[in-house]
Amino acid sequence: MKNKPNELCQSCGMPLNKDPQGGGTHADGVKSKKYCSYCYRSGLFTRPEFTVQEMQVLCIDKMVEMKLPRFIAKYLVRNIPKLERWRNR
């Protein structure tokens, strides 16, 4: 499965075409079209206890670790609360 450039993980907001595993997996092993491999494996969220704020902090920290300026990382995570996983929480 090849993801389109504008498809984002509906948990963390990472572009799915940047996922080295090609996406998360459902319980039956089929690739997810909604979630990345960092957030979703074998049909379960890898961090089910996370709040949206904890996800934003994790993503900011990861981007800073990858040498992105913190102010840009904060800008990039602003829409995480609007993603499918977090919308109704």
Image (cartoon, rainbow, N blue to C red):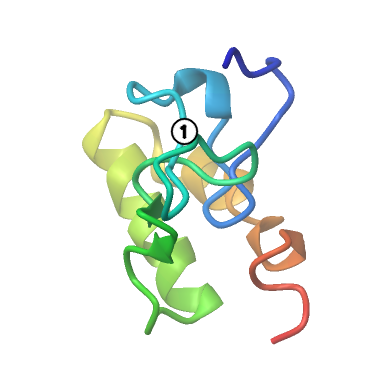
Q: Which residue is most to the front?
A: 28
Which quadrant is the C terminus positioned in? bottom right
Quadrant the N terminus occupies: top right
Q: Nearer the viewer, residue 30 or 80?
A: 30
Question: Where is mark 1, residue-wise?
Answer: 23
Residue shown at the point (47%, 50%) measured from the top left = 26
Find numbered disc 1 in the image and state the secondary structure of the residue it sits on.
Answer: loop
Res 76 → quadrant: top right
Percent of width and height locating residue 17: 54, 19
Label 1, residues with CA under 10 Å away: few <14, some 14-19, many ≥20: many
Where in the figure is residue 64, as x and y percent of width and height?
Answer: 30, 41
- Residue 27: quarter of image: bottom left
The residue drawn where x is 44% and y is 66% is 55
81 left or right of 60? right
Q: Is residue 12 left or right of residue 20?
A: right
Residue type indicated by callout 1: Gly
Mark count: 1
Instruction: Kindly indicate the quadrant of the structure image that contains residue 32.
Output: top right
* 8, above or below 70, in the image: above
- Compared to 23, does 75 lie above or below? below
Q: Nearer the viewer, residue 11 or 40?
A: 40
Q: Is residue 78 above or below residue 2?
A: below
Which residue is farthest left? 65
Q: Is residue 11 left or right of residue 85?
A: left
Relative image position of residue 14 (x, y in whole percent): 53, 37
Residue at 48% across / 44% down in the picture? Answer: 73
Residue 5 located left or right of residue 44: right
Asked if 17 appears above or below 71 in the picture, the reply is above
At 48% across and 37% down in the image, what residue appears?
30
